[in-house]
Amino acid sequence: MNPTDFKPPLVAILRGLEPARSADVGRTLFDAGFRLLEVPLNRPGALECIATLSELKLPGALVGGGTMLRVADVDAVHAAGGQLFVSPNCNPAVIAHAVGLGMLAAPGVATPTEAFAALDAGAHALKLFPFETIGLGGLKALLSVLPAGTPLWPVGGVTPQSIGPGVSAGATGFGVGSQLFRPGVSLAALADAARSFIAAWSAAAR
């Protein structure tokens, strides 16, 4: 699975998504232009949300789980129809298991050691986390030693305003959390925020 197949490469991180709202939230984000939807597992109802989003069969979209720490998490998300693996850490055994199931794997890394371990395990993209502390300097330094063309997606504190500088520094995608989605956000506000991120990406990626 190739992360470049999904455009724009912006992951909507839906932490705290309620199962009853998952279909409406998913459709709203899809209509605004998002194609990568992640529901972190460290909130109740995450697997139910993943199943509902997967059942929507949004064309060209990829649904999966975040905060996937164990092989059992991978199996549970895969059984719910999820095809995207995201984690905050680098666990080669868990990464390899997700890759073996045909999932797009984007594990979290913060150092060159973690980045190369993730790539050796088969990761398709690297989630640079937490980007608030690593910053643009850390992004540039990491890219200087990674294989050319390695997809690197900053996550943590990403705003529409930070996308342009991030792309200029070499980021190839982003994970967007609370600046996009919070539990209880109205669908209208969610659509507005989503369109702002899509517009920022479109402007930066020209």
Image (spheres, rainbow, N blue to C red):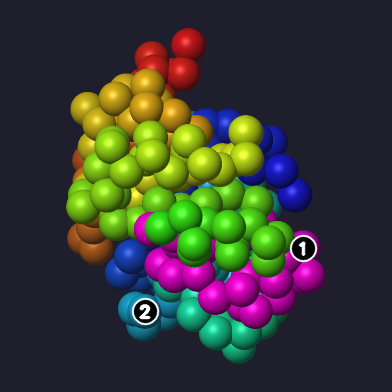
**Would residue 63 be counted in the magenta stretch?**
no
Q: Is residue 10 visible?
A: no
Q: Nearer the viewer, residue 158 or 116?
A: 116
Residue at 59 percent of width and 62 percent of height: 118
Residue at 46 percent of width and 18 percent of height: 205
Q: Nearer the viewer, residue 102 or 27?
A: 102
Position in image of residue 58 (x %, y %): 63, 46
Q: Gap between marks 2 and 1, in whole Å?
A: 23 Å
Read off the residue under disc 1. Answer: 102
Residue at 25 percent of width and 31 percent of height: 162
Residue 83's place in the image compared with 178, above or below, is below
Q: Which mark is residue 48?
A: none
Q: Quadrant of residue 168?
A: top left
What segment is highlighted magenta in the picture? 86-110
Q: Residues within 10 Å of mark 1 (few under 14, many from 20)?
A: some
Position in image of residue 131 (x %, y %): 29, 49
Q: Is residue 165 visible?
A: yes
Type of amino acid under label 1: Gly
Secondary structure beneath dot 1 equals loop
Position in image of residue 204 (x %, y %): 39, 18
**Would residue 103 be counted in the magenta stretch?**
yes
Residue at 40 percent of width and 51 percent of height: 128
Position in image of residue 126 (x %, y %): 52, 52
Apparent side of residue 30 relative to residue 104 in the rendered image (left or right): left
First reached walking from the N terminus: tag 2 or tag 1: 2
Secondary structure beneath dot 2 equals loop
Read off the residue under disc 2. Answer: 42
